[in-house]
């Protein structure tokens, strides 16, 4: 028996079932996570005190990310509106800077926020309300939950790929240092992991977890990169969060194949 599946593409997916709605909704979640993390990193680098208001976007987008993960339609819309405000407000106030300065990245986040709204509304239309647990350790009781949990590894790998690519590009453009072969390999490997996890590959989900552990071991072996308390605290926090994301990805991907087999519906992606 064949069924209609979610075609489209990453930038504008078709939403025809609950797993597709979850996947689209997660675009809004990970966009909010990105908008929460970036200001915090900048504030920590500039050693801004917590009372300065520099972490306001981190708090707001963090709450929005949490609620979008709970499939809140209100917060999905709020995330989109807050992001548009954060990008548009500096146009009328020249001395301020937008939340995201790179035009391409800013446009992609806008598309992902819109998809988050589409997916969240579709989720409530296509599936009954269920207890989905917590974002850091979701319950996996059906295919939508398996897709959502698996996508944690996909978006984590995408985030690392984008960050490393921007890092390499800035060094090349500014000529402020040298880049070894490992920097290029990290971009390539995390990009391949993201592609494989999106296809629900158990092999790539497991490889992504192993790759991230090796990556963090290499990072923490370079004390010159963690010479301040703020950098150490930020590195440990990020490492723990991404480790959880990749572990959840393995859980979700294996559960996806198990639940697909039990329901006699073939998986959307192909296992590697």
Image: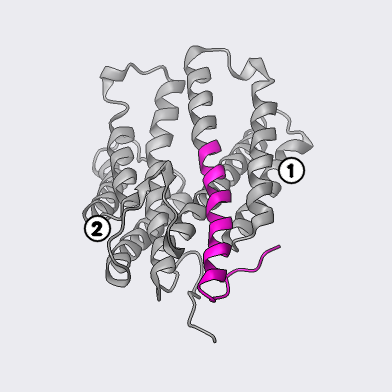
Dot 2: what SS? helix
Label 2–label 1 contact, CB within 8 A: no
Q: Nearer the viewer, residue 80 or 263?
A: 263
Where does the image place residue 193, in percent across and percent down from the top left? 65, 52
**Residue 113: percent from the left, percent from the top?**
35, 56
Disc 2 or disc 1, which is closer to the eye?
Answer: 2
Left or right: residue 18 versus residue 246 is: left
Which residue is farthest top?
Answer: 228
Give the image location of residue 87, x and y in percent: 32, 46
Task: Report the residue that reaches farthest toward the bottom.
Answer: 1
**Which residue is found at the position 46% from the left and 46% from the top?**
102
Residue tagged 1: 185
Query: In the displayed structure, would residue 224 be above or below residue 146?
Result: above
Magenta residues (range): 243-272
Q: Nearer the viewer, residue 256 or 30?
A: 256
10 Å crowding of disc 2: few (<14), some (14-19), many (20+): many
Residue tagged 2 = 73
State whether the magenta stretch is mostly helix, strand or loop: helix
Q: Earlier in the sequence, mark 2 or mark 1?
A: 2
Query: How many discs mark residues in the rendered view?
Result: 2
Say which quarter of the image contains residue 239.
top right
Q: What's the residue at 59%, 61% (across, down)?
A: 200
Whether the magenta-drawn stretch holds residue 180 is answered as: no
Kindly report the distance in space between the C-alpha atoms of the residues bearing marks 2 and 1.
39 Å
Q: Image check: 257 left or right of 229?
A: right
């Amino acid at each position: 028996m064949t069924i209609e599946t979610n075609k489209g593409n990453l930038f504008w997916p078709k939403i025809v079932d609950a797993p597709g709605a979850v996947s689209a909704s997660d675009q809004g979640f990970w966009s909010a996570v990105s908008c929460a993390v970036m200001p915090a990193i900048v504030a920590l680098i500039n050693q801004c005190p917590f009372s300065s208001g520099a972490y306001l976007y981190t708090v707001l987008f963090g709450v929005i990310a949490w609620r979008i993960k709970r499939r809140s339609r209100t917060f999905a819309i709020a995330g989109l509106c807050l992001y548009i405000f954060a990008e548009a407000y500096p146009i009328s106030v020249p001395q301020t800077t937008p939340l995201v300065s790179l035009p391409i990245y800013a446009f992609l986040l806008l598309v992902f926020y819109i998809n988050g709204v589409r997916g969240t509304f579709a989720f409530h239309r296509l599936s009954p309300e269920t207890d989905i647990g917590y974002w850091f350790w979701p319950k996996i009781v059906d295919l939508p939950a398996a897709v959502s949990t698996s996508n944690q590894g996909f978006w984590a790998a995408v985030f690392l790929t984008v960050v490393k690519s921007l890092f390499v590009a800035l060094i090349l453009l500014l000529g402020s240092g040298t880049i070894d072969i490992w920097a290029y390999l990290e971009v390539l490997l995390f990009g391949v992991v993201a592609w494989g996890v999106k296809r629900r590959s158990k092999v790539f989900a497991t490889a992504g977890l192993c790759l991230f552990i090796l990556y963090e071991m290499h990072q923490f072996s370079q004390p010159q990169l963690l010479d301040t308390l703020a950098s150490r605290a930020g590195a440990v926090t990020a490492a723990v969060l991404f480790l959880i994301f990749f572990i959840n990805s393995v859980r979700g991907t294996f559960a996806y194949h198990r639940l697909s087999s039990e329901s006699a519906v073939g998986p959307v992606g192909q296992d590697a």
